[in-house]
Amino acid sequence: MTDRPIYLDYNATTPLDPEVIAAMQPYLTDRFGNPSSAHQYGSQAKNAIERARAQVAALLFCQPEEIVFTSGGTESNNAAIKGIAWSRRHLGNHIITSQVEHSSVTAVCQFLERQGFQVTYLPVDSLGRVEPEAIERAIRPETVLITVMHANNEVGAIQPLEAIVHMAHDRGVIVHSDAAQTAGKIPTDAGLIGVDLLSVAGHKIYGPKGVGALYVRSGLALEPLLHGAGQEFGQRPGTENVLEIVGFGVACELAKRDMHRNYAHLRDLRNRLCDGLKEHIPDVRMNCDVNHSVPNTLSICFKNIDSHRLLAAMQDRVAASTGSACHSQDAKISFVLKAMNVPVEWARGTVRFSVGRFTTASEIDAAVGAIASAVDTQRRRG
């Protein structure tokens, strides 16, 4: 047993897998070379990066040369959206996105609006999904990019990307997707989905923080965010973060290797948590269809409960969040729930629980008891 609270916030970040730690260890000591150096130390580091590139590519079912390493999901999203906007501005100035994107997408779109771009923010249905027909209606002759996340970070809803891509490509429009919450949880085949750009983050798949990747379809030209030397095919200059790239590569290899086993584990524990909460707590509702969501995420509303007070009351027993970790201190109702038209009396009591590879059934059962007790106490106190 441990005195630490049960961790149910895997969508915010994941612990490092022991195999990832072991792979990174040598790069903290004797394997310190600069990958651009021509001698043995440099070659050793360069080879490690290329091995990791192949591991990331294998997870995304793409070619290694289509992988650009970045500092994480936020940079990947910035590089994709700004890179396409600037490189294709001569073709148009219109971008389409959804109202439930991560802030690293919406903030970029808002920045580009100040640079003269026009952005359409599409609504979602009550389950958090964009309707492909709405995408089709929004496309204009001047549309250069559609950016829609693969799955929502707050409620877990998987978007109909294949249909969106098909419509976009028929009109010659580039498609980018933020796949930070899907890579490693569900098959994320860049070629099968058909996207042109795909963002992933290391710390969401049991790798280190501060590293990620952007899949860039072969032949697609991007204006780089940074300028300097020619690292990462000229798309991301600067001396590479070898230590974390190595860890990220191994994390991707493990995710691909254990995908089916992990999927079943996550789904079963998420469902166990959902069933337990519905059994022990009256007046609850889910914010997503479990058949169209990532297997580990449960966004659930407790009617007439303040979610921040609830999390504070059980912080010594259960670690969860109200939604995106990027806005965990914001007491306002999530913009995602607003876009889904969740009634206020439900939305203010929303908690996101996300299970992970290391979560156990006994932890879920203990968490159900702790959550039910905290909800009951808050309701009795009014």
Image: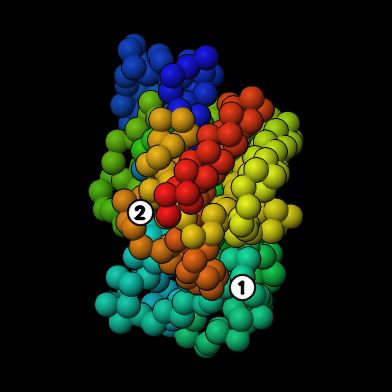
Tell me the quarter of the picture where residue 348 sits. Answer: bottom left
Colour scheme in use: rainbow
Q: Horizontal and vertical percent for residue 237?
A: 31, 45
Please give the residue where the numbered disc 1 appears in the rendered image.
125
Q: Residues within 10 Å of mark 2 (few under 14, many from 20)?
A: few
Image quadrant where residue 263 sits: top right
Q: Residue at x 47, y 77 (%)?
A: 121
Q: Position of residue 246 (x, y in %)?
A: 46, 27
Mark 2 and mark 1 lie on one chain; the one further toward the N terminus is 1
Cα distance in 3D space between marks 2 and 1: 23 Å
The residue depicted at 50 percent of the width and 29 percent of the height is: 6
Q: Reply above or below: 171 against 285.
A: below
Quadrant that contains the C terminus:
bottom left
Q: Which mark identifies residue 327?
A: 2
Q: Report the number of discs.
A: 2
Coordinates of residue 38 in the picture (x, y in percent): 34, 25
Residue at point 28% right, 53% down?
226
Q: Secondary structure at mark 2?
A: helix
Residue that lies at the very extreme toward the front in this rendered image: 380
In this rendering, the answer to whether 342 lies above or below 329 is below
* Camera-nearest residue between 99 and 29: 99
